[in-house]
Structures are given as structure tokens and as C-alpha cells.
Amino acid sequence: MTRFSYAEYIALFRSSDTKRNSSAQKSTSSSGRAADRDDAPTDPSEMICAVRRAHVQPVSEACDSDDWTALHEAAHRGQTHCVQALLKDPRVCVDKRTLQEQTPLLLAVHGRHLDCVRSLLEAGADPDINNKNKETPLYKACEQECISTVRLLLAFGATVNQRCYRGCTALHEAARRDNAELCETLLQARAAVDARNADDVTPAIEAARHGRTQTLAYLIRNGAGVNVQTCDGNTALTEACRHGHGETVKLLLKHHADANRATAAGLLPLHIASQHGHKEIVSLLLPITSRARIRQSGISPLHLAAEHDRQLVMSLLIESGFDVNSKLSHERSARYHDRRVSALFCAVAARNTQAAAVLLKAGADPNVDPFSPLLLAARHGCLKTVAVLVEHGAHVNARPPGPTAGFPAVLLYAHQLDVLQYLLDNGCDAQACFTCDRRHSEEDANFRSHASQRNTSCTKTELQFCDWISSSCWRHSAGQFIDLLLDYVGNVQLCSRIRDLLLDKQEWTSIKEKTSSPRALMHLCRLKIREQLGTQRLRSVHSLPLPDRMLRYLSSRSSSRSCSIPHFHGHAAFAASACV
């Protein structure tokens, strides 16, 4: 084999330049003389430049790195004749790596330069040397979907089951690319059909995850396991359900995929499909999913559909007989700090008003959770959700678990006046806010402090409204808050703490008038009638067989203007007696 120096290669590549000047000729002859000495030093960058001049494409910045040789450049650009010329020099390392651990073979494969690949392999390039990500030339060829390169690499002994840094084999990549021909070639080379990556994902699961139905069918025909599970307990069916690949689900069910095999989280494929809103897949799974296995999972598909606002799936599940009042198991409920149990609570917690309405219309009970969904909706400030819950029987005076307050708990969570007014219109007990009979003097405060020190084992008393309003987020708008509350109570007196809080508020004049005894008879009659109606009938007050003017009177708020309405006392007395 003829031995060439780098200088001779440079002369070879420069011979194609037609416009060489005299200085270039001198450089060439000088280099030729230097070639007579085996140890003649040559700048590698000159060789790279020569390779570049053999091709008209722009030069990448990476070519100037010391680790990037002329052979890398030629392989990268697909300069087969340059590759062949360089490989004749025994000093050229065919498997030299760049900083990214790329060999010339890997670069040629990545560029789809088949002739360069063949030349490198014939020169002894190792087909199994991987890059920094542990990706081999075979893996890269599958990524490029270049069947000719794959066959060539296999012919030169490439390891078919070598793994990348994620543990994936070439067959994983072929399956993900939906290339059945690649899969066939790899399987003929004895690729492991159920090879697992770092997450125990097989090529079949990879195909199902991406909806590669034809490739999946081919893998199954060649022995791929249909019910193999990943480290998270997912199967090919689970992945197809998650990503909404209906045709893939049909194929898997045709090949006896187990619809009752749960994931590590205890969820069945029906749960997964419901959570992601794939109605067609849900309809496929409903007839073959065991209701007993669903009960064992501790959660209904309705919970997941409601939480993720999948209204069409919810309607389908309800039509199929799923109980809208089914509860989470104790173990699943304990995972939530609010200890929720119902699908309705899941919908309200996710602020899915329409999903909540679907459940309520189907008969969901709004009062089964330890923490009422109404309190949560009031905290969110969503009047529409509050209204739909109240209309379907949510208790406006519900109490949360734990320490209690001496006034309606919903006031602790209602941070908007429109929500507060709606709750008061529908039976929220405003009277309980003005039952404080304590004197908030300095002496009393000292007395309570000393008493507390003497008896530290005494139980905590109920939180009083005056204490809460003085320290809550309503402190700065306490005037509006209390002015509204007074429209729903009769004769009350404000304790000293509330009075001191309100003295500098602009609503003080109105509040002072409303707390002056006695209140207007018109207002007291309204309260009495509403009290007799009760909170349940109060919601349908407009359907009562009463004159329109009477209905407007019952629905309006208290004000000094109410007293100017003439000839109402008879109607009020009549309605009050009728409701008793």
C-alpha cells in the first residue's frame, strides 16, 4: 500500500484548484520535499481546509476543533474519495473520536452517506462504538430510517441489542418510527423483541405509546408480549389509552390485552382513558372492565373525569350506570389534605363548574364530603359554582371538620360580597354573627389572660365573629361586610370591638341606623316570612303563589326605603300566617 503524508494529501486536494498562484506552487513543492521525511510536521487544519475545498457546502464552526480531523470532516461531508485517500495512510485512526465521542463512521451514518459508511467499515471501523449518549451507528441509522445503512452495519457485525443511555435498543427506535421494514431487518438479526429500556419499556409499548399500529401488529406477530408491564405498571394498552390511539386499542384488545390489569398507582385502562377524555376508548373498555376491579382500585373513573373536566366521558359513564355518589376509598381519600370523597368535590376543587353541574343534575349529593364543596367554591369566589351547589341542596350553614366557629363557617371562606350576598339570600344564618355578649374592655382582657394562665388545660372556646372580623382579610372592608349582614337580621346590638372597628368606616352612618331599635316593621315581617319558608323553600321563593310585588318584597334587601312602600302590612301578615 502506498504511503502518503498529509502534505501529499493537501497537494492532491489542491490540484483541483485552477487558479493557483506562484506562491501556492512553491508551497506545494516545498511540501512535496517535506514529504520525503516521514516526520514532516503538517498543520491538521490545512488538511481540513483541503477537504472543504473538495465540497462547496459551508463549513461548520466545529471543524476548527483540535479533536476534529480531516477524516471526520470528509465523513461528515460525504466526501468518499477523500475518505478513501485518507484511509490509505496508516497514521490515520479510523475510530478516532471527537469531544462528543463521535467516530467518522457515526458521522457518516448521521449524514446518510452510504458509500462513506462502506469505505469506513471496509477499513476496519468498529460499528459498535457509541457517542456521548451511548448511541451506536446502528441506533443512528434506525433514527434516520436508512434501511440500506442498517443492513450494511449488520453485515459488518454491528451488535443488534446494544443500548443507548436510556437503555433503548435499535428496535425501540424502529418501533417508534413506525418502520416495519426496519423491525423485520432487526428481528432477522436476532434483535430481542421484548428488550426493556431503563423504564422497562419494550418496543411494543413504545409503538403503542405513539400509535404505531402496523408496527405493533408486526411485533405481536413475532412474539412481542401484549401484557408486559413497565416499572410503573403500564402496559401497551395503558399507553394507548393515555394517548388516545383508538385503533391501537382495538388491535391490542383483539390480541387479548388485559383491560383489568392495574398500574402501580392502582388505575385500570378505563381510569386512564376517562382521565384523558377519550370517549371512544372508554366506550370500548366499558363492556370488558370488571366493576369489582374498579371498586378494588378505590376510585371511580368518574372522579378522574370530573377532576379533569371530561364532560362527555362523564355523561357516558353515568349512562353506563356509574354511581355519581361513589366515594374514594379511605386510603385514597387520606392522600388529600381535605379528605375528599366525592367526584363532585374533585370537580369543584379543579374549578370545573360545568362538570359539577353534570354530576348534580345526575343526582350527586353536595353534602357528603367532610369539607363541604360549597365552602371550597366560596373560597374560590366562583359565584356560578356556589349557585349551582345551593340550587341542588348544598347546606349554606355547613360546618367544616375541626375547631368550630360561633357563626356560619361559609363566612370564613367567602371573600367576595356578591358570593356573600347570594349565600345570605339563600338562608345563611347572619343572626349568629351578632350573638357576642362579651365586654371587650382592657380589664376583661387582663382577666382572661390570667385565667388562661391559671388553667392551661381548658378547652378552646368557639371563634367569635367579632374576633374574626377584627383580624381577617375583611378587616379593611368590614364596613361593607357588616352593613350587608345587617340587612338579614332584626334588632341586634354591636359589641364594643365591632363598634370600635367601624367608627371610622364610611358605612358607619348606615350601620348605626340599622342597629337602632326598633327596626322597621316591613323589614321584620320580611325576615319572619323568610324564616318560616326555611332555606330549602327559600330557593324557590319566586315560584310561590303570591303577587309579583310580594315576591319582589321577599327577595329584596332591607333598607330605609322599604318603609316607604304603602299598603304592605296586610300582605306581609297574610304571607307570614300562611307559611306558619
Image: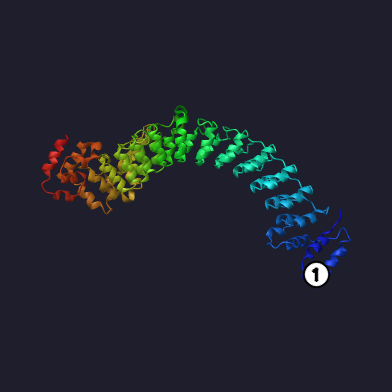
Percent position of residue 530, x then y? 20, 39
Give the residue number, with chain letter if any, for mark 1: 24
In the rendered image, residue 87, in percent from the top left (x then y), is placed at 80, 53
Secondary element at tag 1: helix
Instruction: State the image quarter where residue 517 is shown.
Output: top left
Image mark count:
1
Q: Which residue is farthest bottom? A: 22
Residue at image position (84%, 70%) is 26
Where does the image place residue 167, in percent across and percent down from the top left? 64, 40
Please give left or right for residue 281 compared with residue 511 in the image.
right
Residue at position x 25%, y 37% from top? 535
Q: Is residue 62 visible?
A: yes
Q: On the image, which quarter does residue 339 sit in?
A: top left
What residue is rendered at 53% in x and 33% in y? 254
Q: Is residue 417 left or right of 280 when viewed as pictured?
A: left
Furthest residue toward top? 292
Q: Quadrant of residue 462?
A: top left
Front residue of 4/298: it is 4
Please name whichever residue, 165 or 14, is drawn nearer the observer in this view of the structure.
Answer: 14
Q: Residue at x 45, y 36 (%)?
A: 282
- In the rendered image, the quadrant that contains the C terminus is top left
| Residue type of the residue flagged with mark 1 | Ala
